[in-house]
Image (cartoon, helix red, strand yellow):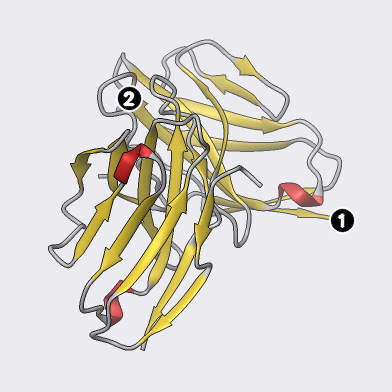
């Protein structure tokens, strides 16, 4: 257990539905990251927050994706109008500013879009 | 764009040293080498990083060649729990080094 938790661990949804995932980082970590991982590939960066500010979004993050980190604590990742191509593991990580190389990852949320 | 090249898979006997190679021939002077691993059904886990000197911590040792074009992660006494995908990542210090760029990594299988 790294101290980063994600909920739910698994989500099965029908195409076109909206889903929301939650990440609770290590409490003293001010940076939070979202990655996506498909089968057989390494994780791909999606976005990151410093405190409550979203500082970068990858091109992978289409308009259907939105992430928030209200009050700089937990974060949510919402996917609207899900597509089968969204099926993946969604990983959250956190770190201390200045130690971005040492990111602590949660167990991930596995999304299956049917 | 892949900055690192790793073998897709390796085997190691339990109790023996596991030596995982990584080529990063286009590494820049301000780029560090980072290693993470991902055990099945878990998120990645940071192992170690280095710039040009060899590094050792409680998990592993990192040997970087003098020209910095390649490195080797060494697990001195591999156990079954070390079976995982090992990722070698090259990234600049500061700036955008928050954005870890994972390749496909090396699947290390430790056999009893």
What separation in Å lies between label 2 and label 1 (alpha carbons)?
36 Å
Q: Residue at x 36, y 43 (%)?
A: A33
Q: Which residue is mark 2?
A: B27
Please tell me the numbered disc located at residue B50: none
Q: CB under 8 Å between callouts 2 and 1?
A: no
Sequence-wise, which precedes: disc 2 or disc 1?
A: 2
Q: Residue furthest front?
A: A71
A7 or B47: which is nearer to us? A7
Q: Residue at x 29, y 41 (%)?
A: A48
Quarter of the picture containing the N terminus of chain B is top left
Could one spot residue B25 in this view of the protein? Answer: no
Q: Which residue is mark 1?
A: B112
The image shows a total of numbered marks equal to 2
| A76 vs A84: above or below | above
* Dot 2 crowding, Cα within 10 Å, few <14, some 14–19, many 20+: some
Task: Check the residue under mark 1 and report the chain it is in.
Answer: B
**Same chain for the residues at labels 2 and 1, yes or no?**
yes
| Residue B23 x %, y % | 44, 34
B16 or A48: which is nearer to us? A48
Q: In the rendered view, does A14 fall on the left or right side of B45? A: left
Could one spot residue B101 in this view of the protein? Answer: yes
| B26 vs B11: above or below | above
């Amino acid at each position: 257990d790294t101290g980063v938790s994600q909920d739910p661990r698994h989500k099965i949804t029908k195409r076109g539905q909206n889903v929301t995932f939650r990440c609770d980082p290590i409490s003293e970590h001010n940076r939070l990251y979202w990655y996506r991982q498909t089968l057989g590939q390494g994780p791909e960066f999606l976005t990151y927050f410093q405190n409550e500010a979203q500082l970068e979004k990858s091109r992978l993050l289409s308009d259907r994706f939105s992430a928030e980190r209200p009050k700089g604590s937990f974060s949510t990742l919402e996917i609207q109008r899900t597509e089968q191509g969204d099926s993946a593991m969604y990983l959250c990580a956190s770190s201390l500013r200045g130690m971005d190389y040492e990111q602590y990852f949660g167990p991930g949320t596995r999304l299956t879009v049917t | 764009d892949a900055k690192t090249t790793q073998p897709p898979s390796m085997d190691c006997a339990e109790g023996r040293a596991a030596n995982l190679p990584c080529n990063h021939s286009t590494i820049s002077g301000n780029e560090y080498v980072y290693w993470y691993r991902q055990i099945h059904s878990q998120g990645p886990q940071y192992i170690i990083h280095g710039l040009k000197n060899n590094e050792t911590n409680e998990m592993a040792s990192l040997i970087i060649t003098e020209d910095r074009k390649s490195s080797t992660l060494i697990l001195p006494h591999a156990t079954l729990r070390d079976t995982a995908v090992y990722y070698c990542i090259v990234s600049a210090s500061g700036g955008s080094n928050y954005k870890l760029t994972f390749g496909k990594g090396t699947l290390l299988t430790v056999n009893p």
